[in-house]
Image (spheres, rainbow, N blue to C red):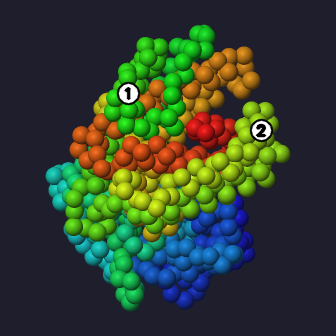
């Protein structure tokens, strides 16, 4: 973690919290935030040193001794980002509770006329959490120095709200946003890092709830937006989103790992399977989508319950895409056919990812050993062939490539909940590292399909790593069973997905002569993205995306 040191040890004297907005109080606060922000789990630029923090805009929560600040962070490389942070002045027993429950949320100890106090993240205070909910429930407004915060409840809000009080608590998950839970009914997501424009999670949630009436999501119930005076683009910024809280048994990733643990136990003493099945790369055809045969008895015997779940997830994924393609006059959601320019742009994007990932792999090759080193060498030798595969989707004729729609954009097993024997889809924010314009762009639904197929692969190998140590006598045997599971599950997912699409809108996905090369290109892109991530973060996992690349057809 890099941060500029703070050498200002003067006492922080405040009469009330609004003292942090003026004169010496503001100067002192901006200095303290240089060291405070990198310690917060939601701060997303920990690898860069903060050069300066400036309060761009602010407002007070009336009567609560709390303020909401909009901060511009300048980094040592000259880049900037905008975050929002609510601060409260807290004394007595309440201050002691904050010290015990969230010491990292304390900005500073403070001297006040009433005695010692702390300046801390205001989401720790119940009155502030209730004020945020009330802003949405009342369609209220809160004026800032340079704009207005608008709370907006959705048409689905009243049916879920009821009349009982909803005590709030702050979520503890490590994530880039902050979650506030209201009883067992609501979850509010505070988008800590702000970008001009509507957040895709809010935008898509509203469309699926109010226009498409898609029920396999957490229902969209409202949001808070900031409108800034003098904004030349006229865009508002999403600050928070309210959704219904879905009762669940955990996310799809952990549920899948639990299922795989039982699967490996059942096959650990068996010889390797004779038939590994077809990989997802060979399944992207009308035959596999629509009339794929039932899984072989061996696959059904050992992973039957998960095969059924994969088919259900395939149907739900298709229903999500069909809902996102609902006819509408809203230009942000109207489905569009692929153009030649779109295809060339996709090919160029994948080729760029190829260059970034393989250059990093070449640099990291000396650190790899064993199977990973051998696989890396093979992948590097395929550079020309992989580039050709990326370019294969570029075409002078765009007929039959399906439609471009809004998609999930970051689709994997961690983005679904297992709920009452079904799946609920979450988090339509897209990949956080991408710009808002990129996350809002219309794309082929097959990009989401590729993401989920790659997630099956990751789950198979992550569970295998947990079940056995690398190099053990049965490791190779179990790797064959991992491949058998992955291929069988991918087959069921794709078959159910294709049947569901074909029954309602067969032109949404590419036609027979294009579907395989498009899905293979997107699988390659996803595996290359994973490869770059693992090289930077978990070198011992590099073999997983390498295996995915090598499984693609020649």
Q: Nearer the viewer, residue 218 or 542?
A: 542
Q: Nearer the viewer, residue 12 or 373?
A: 373
Residue on which disc 1 sits: 292
Q: Nearer the viewer, residue 303 or 125?
A: 303
Residue 166 visible from this viewpoint: no
The kind of secondary structure element at disc 2 is: helix
In this picture, residue 518 sits left or right of residue 45: left
Residue at position x 65%, y 48% in the image: 385
Residue at position x 68%, y 67% in the image: 48
Which badge, 1 or 2, is on the more N-terminal residue?
1
Q: Position of residue 210 (x, y in %)?
A: 21, 58
Residue at position x 35%, y 83% in the image: 234
Residue 68 drawn above or below residue 219: below
Residue 213 drawn above or below residue 1: above
The quarter of the displayed image where residue 66 is located? bottom left
Residue 28 visible from this viewpoint: yes
Q: Nearer the viewer, residue 107 or 507?
A: 507
Query: What quarter of the picture does the C terminus occupy?
Result: top right
In this picture, residue 385 sits left or right of residue 418: right
Residue 283 drawn above or below residue 195: above
Residue on which disc 2 sits: 373
Q: CA distance from mark 1 to mark 2?
A: 36 Å
Q: Position of residue 418 (x, y in %)?
A: 37, 35
């Amino acid at each position: 973690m890099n941060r500029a040191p703070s050498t200002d040890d003067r006492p922080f004297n405040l009469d009330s919290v609004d003292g942090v907005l003026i004169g010496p109080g503001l100067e002192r606060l901006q200095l303290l935030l240089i060291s405070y922000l990198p310690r917060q789990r939601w701060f997303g630029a920990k690898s860069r040193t903060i050069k300066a923090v400036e309060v761009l805009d602010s407002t007070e929560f009336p009567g609560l001794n709390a303020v909401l600040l909009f901060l511009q962070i300048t980094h040592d490389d000259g880049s900037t980002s905008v975050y929002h942070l609510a601060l409260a002045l807290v004394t007595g027993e309440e201050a002691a509770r904050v010290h015990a429950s969230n010491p990292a949320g304390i900005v500073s100890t403070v001297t006040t006329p009433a005695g010692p106090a702390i300046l801390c993240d205001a989401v720790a205070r119940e009155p502030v959490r209730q004020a945020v909910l009330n802003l949405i429930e009342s369609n209220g407004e809160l004026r800032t120095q340079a704009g207005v915060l608008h709370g907006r409840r959705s048409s689905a809000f009243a049916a879920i709200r009821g009349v009982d009080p909803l005590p709030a608590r702050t979520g503890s998950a490590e994530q880039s946003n902050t979650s506030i839970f209201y009883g067992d009914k609501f979850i509010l997501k505070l988008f800590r890092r702000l970008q001009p424009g509507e957040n895709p999670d809010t935008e898509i949630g509203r469309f699926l709830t109010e226009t498409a009436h898609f029920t396999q999501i957490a229902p969209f119930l409202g949001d808070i937006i900031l409108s800034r005076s003098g904004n030349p683009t006229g865009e508002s910024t999403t600050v928070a989103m309210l959704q219904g809280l879905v009762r669940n048994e955990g996310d799809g990733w952990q549920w899948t790992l639990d299922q795989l643990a039982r699967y490996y136990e059942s096959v650990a003493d068996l010889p390797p399977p004779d038939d590994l099945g077809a990989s997802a790369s060979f399944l992207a055809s009308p035959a596999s989508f629509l009339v794929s045969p039932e899984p072989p008895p061996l696959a059904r015997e050992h992973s039957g319950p998960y095969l059924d779940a994969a088919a259900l997830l395939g149907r739900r994924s298709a229903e999500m895409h069909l809902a996102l393609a609902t006819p509408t006059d809203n230009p942000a959601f109207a489905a569009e056919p692929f153009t030649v320019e779109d295809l060339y742009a996709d090919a160029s994007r994948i080729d760029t990812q190829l260059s970034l990932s393989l250059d990093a792999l070449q640099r990291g090759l000396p650190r790899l050993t064993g199977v990973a080193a051998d696989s890396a060498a093979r992948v590097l030798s395929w550079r020309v062939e992989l580039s050709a595969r990326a370019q294969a989707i570029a075409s002078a004729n765009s007929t039959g490539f399906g439609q471009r729609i809004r998609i999930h954009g970051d689709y994997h097993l961690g983005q679904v909940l297992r709920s009452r024997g079904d799946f609920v889809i979450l988090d339509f924010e897209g990949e956080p590292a991408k710009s808002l314009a990129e996350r809002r762009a219309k794309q082929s639904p097959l990009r989401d399909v590729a993401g989920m197929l790659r997630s099956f692969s990751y789950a198979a190998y992550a569970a295998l790593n947990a079940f056995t140590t690398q190099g053990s006598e049965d490791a190779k045997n179990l790797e064959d069973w991992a491949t058998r599971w992955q291929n069988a599950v991918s087959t069921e997912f794709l078959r159910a997905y294709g049947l569901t699409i074909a029954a309602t809108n067969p032109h949404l996905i590419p036609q027979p002569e294009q579907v395989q090369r498009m899905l293979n290109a997107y699988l390659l892109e996803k595996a290359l993205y994973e490869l770059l991530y693992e090289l930077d973060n978990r070198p011992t996992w590099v073999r997983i995306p390498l295996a995915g690349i090598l499984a693609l057809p020649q």
